[in-house]
């Protein structure tokens, strides 16, 4: 069975730490609660937990098939919460999903496509029984806080790419590879915003609404998670705006470069037109043409061409065309 950990707690201390002890027996003590962590379970494995803790079949179906946006749903006295995890892999944002079943005496987590395990959070809470004694709502806060904190490296990595592309765009027009990287990052940031917006809504509900199994004294902790999510969401929006500016700047620089090339070509065409025109006239081989019999006519013509071309070159140079 894909159970990463299954433990039962009483007053913040472990009283059962194996699969059989948690899933096969009902807790009778008022302060007891079970914390079960599943990773990509199949239908049979999830059905065992559903029967043990009375999970709603619609929520079980959502947790089994995954591919949900963050949401919070209430099924009687239970909460069903979906959160999306994110991490950066080879410059691209990769997403996972974690579903939470929160009841009075249990919290069940179901992970899909995410390697962000909960063992570190579990170990931290188990070393601080006074925190774990708060119950399932504090465990939920700790897990959501971990997910929100893991958004920060993603947005920091995106910020480094944005800064590099911005600097490159200021120096010269972006290359094809850099433009591809820019568009990929814009798409990733847009997808991240699509995840963070409903995640904000979930955290806001946990922080403000009177929900089953969420004590009023724990709500301020969810406000802290909400602040983290909002901060990352605002940075994602800011980075997308900067990328739009970078793209516009790169386009302007490319237009300016093409305009400079056009002016240079026009200037050289004007300079080359002078010898072309004079040589064309004197190459028509008419009998009655002036200066054909002059002893130094050839050198005079070359001198005239040189003077005119030099004057045009100096003129275009002063105008900044060359």
Image (cartoon, rainbow, N blue to C red):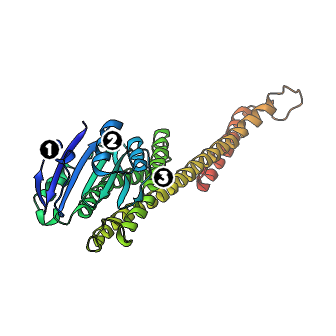
Q: Earlier in the sequence, mark 1 or mark 3?
A: 1
Closer to the chain start, of discs 2 and 3, is 2
Q: Residue at x 47, y 58 (%)?
A: 242
Eyeballing the image, is 283 above or below 257?
A: above
Decide: is 153 above or below 282: below
Q: Nearer the viewer, mark 2 or mark 1?
A: 2
Q: Which residue is mark 1?
A: 18
Which of 64/120 is in front?
Answer: 64
What residue sits right under mark 3 in the picture? 190
Q: Viewed as shown, does residue 294 lie left or right of 17?
A: right
In the image, residue 188 lies at what x, y percent? 44, 48
Q: CA distance from mark 2 to mark 3?
A: 35 Å
Q: Mark 3, residues whose alpha carbon is within 10 Å: few (<14), some, or many (≥20)?
A: some
**x, y percentage for residue 288?**
89, 30
Q: Quadrant of residue 213?
A: bottom left
Q: In the image shown, does 37 or 33 lie closer to the viewer?
A: 33
Q: Distance of mark 2 from mark 1, alpha carbons?
A: 18 Å
Q: Position of residue 40 (x, y in %)?
A: 32, 39
Q: Residue at x 42, y 55 (%)?
A: 70
Query: Going from the N terminus, do you reach mark 2 or mark 1 first?
Result: 1
Quote the CA–CA distance across marks 1 and 3.
Answer: 42 Å
Q: Which residue is mark 2?
A: 47
* Disc 1: CA contacts within 10 A as few (<14), some (14-19) or many (>=20): few
Mark 2 surroundings: few (<14), some (14-19) or many (≥20) residues within 10 A? some
Residue ID at (25%, 38%): 2
The kind of secondary structure element at disc 3 is: helix
Is the residue 310 above or below the residue 42 in the image?
below
In the figure, is residue 307 to the left or right of 50? right
Specify the quadrant of the image occupied by residue 24: top left
Image quarter (top left, top right, bottom left or bottom right) of the N terminus: top left
Q: Dot 1: what SS?
A: loop
């Amino acid at each position: 069975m894909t159970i990463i950990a299954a433990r039962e707690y009483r007053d913040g201390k472990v009283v059962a730490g194996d699969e059989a002890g948690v899933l096969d027996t009902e807790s009778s003590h008022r302060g007891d609660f079970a914390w079960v962590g599943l990773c990509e379970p199949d239908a049979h494995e999830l059905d065992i937990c559903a029967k043990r803790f009375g999970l709603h079949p619609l929520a079980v179906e959502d947790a089994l098939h995954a591919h949900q946006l963050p949401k919070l749903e209430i099924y009687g006295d239970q909460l069903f919460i979906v959160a999306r995890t994110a991490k950066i892999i080879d410059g691209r944002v990769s997403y996972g999903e974690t579903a939470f079943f929160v009841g009075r005496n249990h919290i069940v987590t179901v992970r899909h496509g995410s390697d962000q395990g909960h063992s570190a959070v579990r170990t931290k809470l188990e070393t601080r029984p006074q925190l774990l004694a708060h119950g399932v709502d504090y465990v939920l806060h700790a897990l959501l806080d971990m997910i929100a904190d893991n958004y920060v490296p993603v947005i920091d990595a995106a910020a480094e790419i944005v800064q590099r592309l911005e600097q490159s765009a200021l120096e010269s027009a972006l290359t094809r590879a850099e433009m591809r990287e820019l568009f990929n990052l814009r798409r990733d940031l847009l997808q991240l915003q699509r995840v963070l917006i409903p995640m904000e809504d979930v955290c806001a509900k946990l922080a403000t609404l009177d929900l089953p199994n969420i004590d009023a004294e724990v709500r301020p902790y969810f406000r802290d998670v909400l602040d983290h999510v909002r901060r990352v969401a605002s940075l994602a929006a800011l980075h997308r705006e900067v990328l739009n500016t970078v793209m516009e700047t790169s386009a302007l620089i490319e237009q300016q470069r093409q305009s400079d090339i056009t002016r240079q070509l026009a200037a050289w065409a004007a300079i080359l037109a002078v010898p072309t025109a004079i040589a064309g006239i004197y190459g028509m081989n008419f009998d009655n043409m002036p200066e054909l019999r002059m002893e130094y006519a050839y050198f005079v013509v070359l001198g005239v061409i040189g003077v005119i071309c030099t004057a045009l070159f100096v003129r275009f140079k002063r105008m900044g065309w060359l």
